[in-house]
Structure formats: C-alpha cells, structure tokens
Amino acid sequence: MKYEQLAKDIVENVGGKDNIRRVVHCVTRLRFQLKDEGKANTNVLKEMDGVVTVMKSGGQYQVVIGNHVPDVYKAVLEVAGLQAQAPVEEDGPKEKKGLLNGFIDIVSSIFFPVLGVLAAAGMIKGFNALFIALGWLDNTSGTYQILNAVGDALFHFFPIFLGYTAMTKFGGNKFIGMAIGAALVYPSLSTLTAGDPLYTLFAGTMFESPVYITFLGIPVILMSYASSVIPIILAAYFGSKIEKGFKKVIPDVVKLFLVPFGTLLVIVPVTFIVIGPIATWAGQILGQSTIWIYNLSPIAAGAVLGGLWQVIVIFGLHWGIVPVAINNLMTMGADPILAMVFAPSFAQIGAVLAVWMKTKQQKLKSLSIPAFISGIFGVTEPAIYGVTLPLKKPFIMSCIAAAVGGGIVGITGTHGYLLGGLGIFAIPSFIHPTGGLTIEFWGAIIAMAVAFVLGFILTYLFGMGKGRNSEKGEETVVANTANHKETTVKVNNKVVFSPFNGQMIPLSEINDAAFASGALGAGVAIVPSEGKLFSPVTGTVTALFPTKHAIGIVADDGAEMLIHIGLDTVQLEGKYFTAHIAQGDRVEKGQLLIEFDIEQIRTAGFDVTTPVIVTNHERYKLVPTTEKQIKHGFDLLELQAK
C-alpha cells in the first residue's frame, strides 16, 4: 500500500479509528465525521507531508490531500478496518451544527456523485431544445426522441439515483434506496389517476385531494415523483433508521433478505401515504400564499417568489404553484406567477459565470461550464447542486438577484400567455396574443438581463469570500495554511528567481507523489548544494511552518509560491532549521530566509530535494530555465500570463 503510512498517521491524528463516525472523500479531501473533534491533532495534520491542510465545515472534519485522495481514502479504510463499514455506524454524541450547514452537508454529499452526469444531461436537454428552436430537428424525429431520452432519463428517474446516494449518506443499504426511488417513479401508478376517484379528501379546502387507491384501507394521494428530490431524501433517511432497527432484531442467518423485505414494506407505503402528501400540501399552501401576496402587491410578490424560487424548487414545493399557474392560463388566458419566476435561472447562471471567472480550481471551473450552458436553457440543477449551493454565498447572491428580477416583473405587470419552454425558450411566452411587444414583454427581457448581470456582479464582488481562495472549493495550500491575505494579481513581469544554489530536476522526478503529480502546484525541484534558502520573489511571507521546513510567499505581482525544504522533513520537528523571518514579514528578492544543515538532515535519513512550486499556476504558462546547475538569484521560472 503506497499510502499506508500516511493513512496510519491520519487515522491516528483524527483521534484513532474509534473516534471516526464516518469517512467519505471528494475530489481532493477526506471528509470525516468525528465523534469528538477535540481529539484530533489539527496542527500535526496540517504539518504532515501528504496533507495540504485541514478544514472544518458543514459538520465535517476535512483533511485536504490532493488529486490522489482516492488512494489515500482506500488506505485509510484499510488501516482503520472500515472497508466493510461504509459508512461507520453513527453512535456517540454528535456535533451540533446549524440547520443551514447541516442541510448543505446533506445536499453536497447526496448530489456530488451524480454532478457530472447531471451537468451532461442538462446540456443534452438544452441543446436538443435549441435544435428544435432552430428548425434543425423535428420533435417527432427519431434523433430528437433518442437525444431527449438521453437528456431526460436522469431527471425523470432522479429518485432512483438519489436513493442510492442518499442511502450512502445516511448509512443504509444503497440498493434499498434505489428500490424506494424506483417505486416512486413506477410507471403503472401514474395511470391510476385516469378514471374517477374513489372519493375526495378535504373537499372544499386548499388541501382537496382526490383518492384513487388505498393501501390496507388507508387513502393514498398519488402525485408525480419524477424529478423530485425531497421525498426520496426523506424516505432514504427514515428508511435507513428502519433498516437499522430490523438489523437489531432479525437473526444473522436471514438478515440478507429479511432486512430489505421489512424495510421496503414499511418505508415505501409510508412515503406514499405520509411524505408525498405533506410535500403536496406544503406546495398548495405556498401556491395560495403567492396568490394572496400578488393581490396585495405584485412587486412584493415578484420579489418574494423570485428570490425564494430556487429554494422552493430544491424542496419540491413548486408543484403547488405550477397548478395555480396552469389554472390561471386556462381560465384567464394569462398568468403572472410563472412570469415572476422567469428571472431566477438567469440569476443562477450569472452567479455561475462569476464563479467560473474567479475560482482558481480546475474542478470547479470544469463543472461551471456545463452548468452555465444547461442553465441558459433553464436546466439549473447542475448550477444549484454543483456550484452555487455548496459554496453558499453564490447561491445567496443569485437569490438576491432573482428577487430584483421578480420585482421588475411585478412592476411591469408581466404575464405569461402560454406554457413555453425553459430558460431563453420561455421568452416567446411573454408575447401578447395580439402579437405586440408590450411593456410586459420588455419587462421580462429587462428582468432577465438585470438578474443575470446582478447575479454575476454580486457573486464576483461578495459571493466568493474575502479572497480568491476563500470559497468552499478546492483551496490552494498557501491560502489555507496561514491566514493568507490576498494580493491583487497584476499582469506584468513575472520571473521567479532560484532560491538555492544547486541542481534543478523536473518536479515529476522527485520521490513524493503529492508534489510529483502536480496536485499541489506546478514548478520544479532543486537539490541544494548549501543550506541556505533565499527569497525567489519580492513579496510577503504568508506561511511559515512551525517546523521551519516549508514557506509560502505571495509575490507583489500575485504569484503564490510554496517552497518545501526536503521530503518528509516535517518529521524533524524543526531540528536543523533556522528561520530569519517570521510569518507576515515582507521580504525582498534574494533575501536570506532560512538556513538548514544539509548534512545533518541527510544523516537523519531524509532527502533534501526541494519542490519550488507555484500554487496558482492555472493563471500562467510556466517556462523553466534550461540550466541544470543554478545559483540563487538566477532566473528559475518565467510565468507567462495565459
């Protein structure tokens, strides 16, 4: 096991395997849920070679590793004996966390595994709609039908996918979760509403619900669960609890089939009888409330509904509003409600565009592009679940922008006159039946533009934290190791000078997978010939490890440098290192920063090969010198702006 020792050190310093309630991983980090975070040695973990940094967020203790985190994760499971306990049973006292952090933690964990496919499906749906609008395809053609199936299948059967990921999150049998989701979208149930109902519950009230079937005499209120989110998440949560209860009482010899048998027999009917109706009635209350507010003040209604629409969609409560809108179209020929929620998708993509432009993390950038494209066509799930909601602030900024857009629709009295497409394809629905482009139509266009621009500006200025690295994405090492203060990046001369006398070798050839893979930044490595480290740039020391073996500097022109003296030298605990500067000091190019005893370090069994990397390398094309033997102060890297 290549990462066995690193895994052992991580497990030991998070408090041991008995302190681990659950561990999962994402793109670059191990995400622990610990029984007692006080037992974790955060400072030790931060200083450990192979660990970028440690973060605490959303009720998780996050150990940032880099691109090789899947291998470290496997090693952690192996050394801690957790490979057969995914996830570990949740017992012991739980950390208290706010409702918002708790909700975002659940959403992030459940949606993260399907984000790539979700974004791809959204793009296919959007482009298919575009091909129809341009006349390139006919909606009766086989090409359209197949593309539509490819793009729409994930959304239609979303409860099945979420059943798997939600059960993973809550610690239940993943295939039980899939079975629950499949039951919710079982095709035959949708045909049962074709005839006359057996009777109607709560007739004459907003909760009026026709009943077409019963379960053991209990009325079942049928609704469409295709594309729904909240019912399956709730069902998976309660299903995981029921499953654990059955595990405790059913003998081991028959657990394999009797536990799923009992769990499904309980949770699926409960979902249809209780969870579904609650979601339906909550939506109906929301729909009636919207009409009441609109009658009081169209501007207020537009701002409230527009601002909250994305939250409403997340909880699946929009199904209570859509029927009200359809009824308005059928009875009055026009509807103001769907007009008020036209702007939010554009506020979303404005926020996503700002994230794409401002983040330095390639993974977030690559996810933002398809999320933006699908959002143009009104498919915003990839944007919400993949980009803005996990980052929190961009989601909030998009809601503010959407509220302004909704208020503009209210001011202009914009109505929709038909059920058109989503996103930009909804624009024709605001054209008055007489064919004139009235103030109502232009109100929708203005609302769309304002929501997009405002979503972008608010997110760019206020939605990414205090600096470029403060978003809840994949943070760079310099930004998270030392209360880093961001500097403004200038696009002028960027030359990094050699900090050592010695021999330069390619970074990929050093005996450290984290640095050699480029996970922590791009650059070169130097085998120093004397124990003196000089500043390669003029700037500010943003990180100086207590062990003095590594230093982070942000140059005045914005380049972020990390110099790690030797490999695994953190284990020397500062022995043989002498620092001549402190964290926060301003340093000049060529200034002596650290002295170290090369011979003593080598005698102790450590490699003195030193990575010299640029952690915000995405901004540059790095051109290293062709010289192999170099001296401090000589050109080492030229950073050409991309």
Image (cartoon, grey):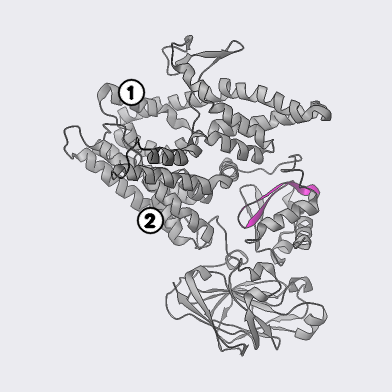
Asked if residue 64 can be seen in this view, the reply is: no
Could you tell me which quadrant the C terminus lies in?
bottom left
**Which disc is residue 327 wearing?**
1
Residue linked to disc 2: 457
Query: Between disc 2 and disc 1, whose residue precedes?
Result: 1
Provide the major secondary structure of the magenta segment: strand
Q: Which mark is in front, 2 or 1?
A: 1
Residue 496, relative to residue 163: is it above or below?
A: below
User: Is 531 placed left or right of 179 in the picture?
Assistant: right
Query: Closer to the camera, 518 or 322?
Result: 518
Q: Which mark is residue 238?
A: none
Q: Which amino acid, by three-letter code, is at mark 1?
A: Asn
From the top left corner, tell me how far across and down residue 589 is, in percent: 55, 85
- Inspect the magenta stretch and tell me whether residue 70 lies in it: no
Quarter of the image holding residue 152?
top left
Q: Residue at x 70, y 75 (%)?
A: 549
Secondary structure found at label 2 = helix
Residues shaded magenta: 18-35
The amino acid type, in three-letter code, at marker 2 is Ile
